[in-house]
Image (cartoon, rainbow, N blue to C red):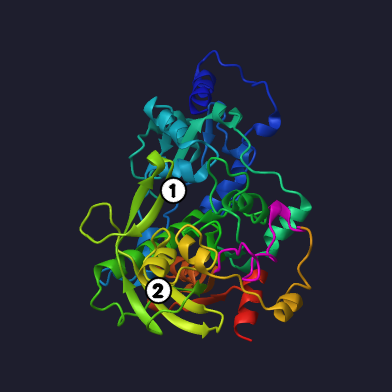
Amino acid sequence: MAKPIILRLINLLSPTASSVIPGNSRLYLCAWSCHYSSATGENFNQEQNQRNDGKWFTLPPYTATINGSALGQELSGSHPEVKCGTAATTPTTALKWVIRCCPELPRNLVQKLFRIRQVRRESASFGNNDLEDQAQGHRLRRVTAKDKMNSGDQIFLPITVKKLPIEKQERDCSTQEQDFIRSLVLYKDPAIIVINKPPGMPVQGGIGIRESLDELARTCLNYKYPESPRLVHRLDKDSSGILVLGRTQISATILHSIFREKTSRASDDMSNINKKKRILQRRYWALVIGCPRRPKGLITAALGKVVLDNGKSDRITIVDNSELSSSQHAITEYRVIGTSSHGYTWLELSPLTGRKHQLRVHCAEILGTPIVGDYKYGWQAHRKMKHLSCPDLEENSSKDIPEKETLPFGLNLEKGSIFEKHSHLHLHCKQMVLPNVSVALQNVQSSPNYDLSKVESLELDAPLPAYMQRSWNTTNS
């Protein structure tokens, strides 16, 4: 799809290009002004942004942007050498500024504009008096993608770019679907949205996936914001619980940095792992088959991927030689929070690193207690485990289970407890503690030298899905 779009753009930029493009006008770039507002905090009138000669479309004046990655590192406390205030601003290239102001344009198309030398810059060093306004054509200079922007500089794109048709990316949601997605919201502020992810719904789209939370969030969780929510971490399709999304590019970058620093910090400094303050904390609840030998402990075991069925599938497993390039160091804290005479145990799991299927593999292969409903890593244990049969409890617990699915997207959060012959995965991100990114951004914007160590943390808690709550009530009764 990228090549036809680029060809249309080149035709638009050619002298013989028509000023009117046939097609559905609803596909035109009609939301640029709101993204300008997001980028600069000001509203720009498109008519005033067009030069008198009609050749250029003007982006807003460049303003220094916050270095989200460095700010995330400061919040994590992982780089003591980074002084307060150094993350306040960061130089931005012309390419990054155009992408930030015009997110609808494909990145490769923007790069093409720079390569064919169709982008201009007006330096802020020039004044704005009438004489210079008459000579403005001489002040516009070609700019390369890597050129650094100075405060007040303005970028000019060919006016025909405004008429470039783009594909509609957002999914149309019914009122019922939108209400359901919004009912999942646990917390919302100007920087982040936190939802209680339902089990059975994939977080990210892909081949064969009809609905995913990242796609639905763009439509249902936008709340008329100029930018769409962005994923900053993932949960497995069949797991549930706290999922954090960044509401802006800056907040998403900060959160990405916090999650990334958490993993690298834990892997690099094992000696002080229990002494350092943890800025980011995640606690999962899991119901497992069997009981660990010790009531609490720290698991440190490298993980690696094994390809099966001639590349058609794969699984994660424990790797003995952690020095292999394909292995990833993984660390998990665990403690028993509940036991049952039926052969089940409730664990609280705290991943100190963020590896694919880390908790599921550590439970199954290190503790020898696979998670209920995890047939990928605990198939043998499920075959040996007898179906829980408590007629009185089962009858009482099944009274409120609806006979038919009533939720959108084919979800059913009621069925799947330990009473069912085919239990759903009992792994839920119950609690999370993370820095208040919204407060940090506000303070850094008002005072670049603000001490980020004073930023308070957010404490989040997500209720268990109905089937896990039913299992919890039964095993703890």
Examine the rendered structure and indicate whether residue 401 appears above or below residue 3: below
Dot placed on the residue nearer the N-terminal end, 2 or 1 = 1
Examine the rendered structure and indicate whether residue 68 appears above or below residue 457: above
The amino acid type, in three-letter code, at marker 2 is Tyr
- Which residue: 28% across, 59% down? 319
Q: Kindly identify which residue carries mark 1.
A: 152
Frontmost of labels 2 and 1 is 2
Magenta part of the chain: 405-426
Relative side of 226 to 458, left or right: right
| Camera-nearest residue between 6 and 93 | 6
Q: Kindly identify which residue carries mark 2.
A: 450
- Which residue: 56% across, 26% down? 160
Within-10-Å neighbours for mark 1: few <14, some 14–19, many 20+: some
Question: From the image, which quarter does the C terminus lie in?
Answer: bottom right
Relative side of 130 to 215, left or right: left
Residue 197 colored in magenta in the image: no
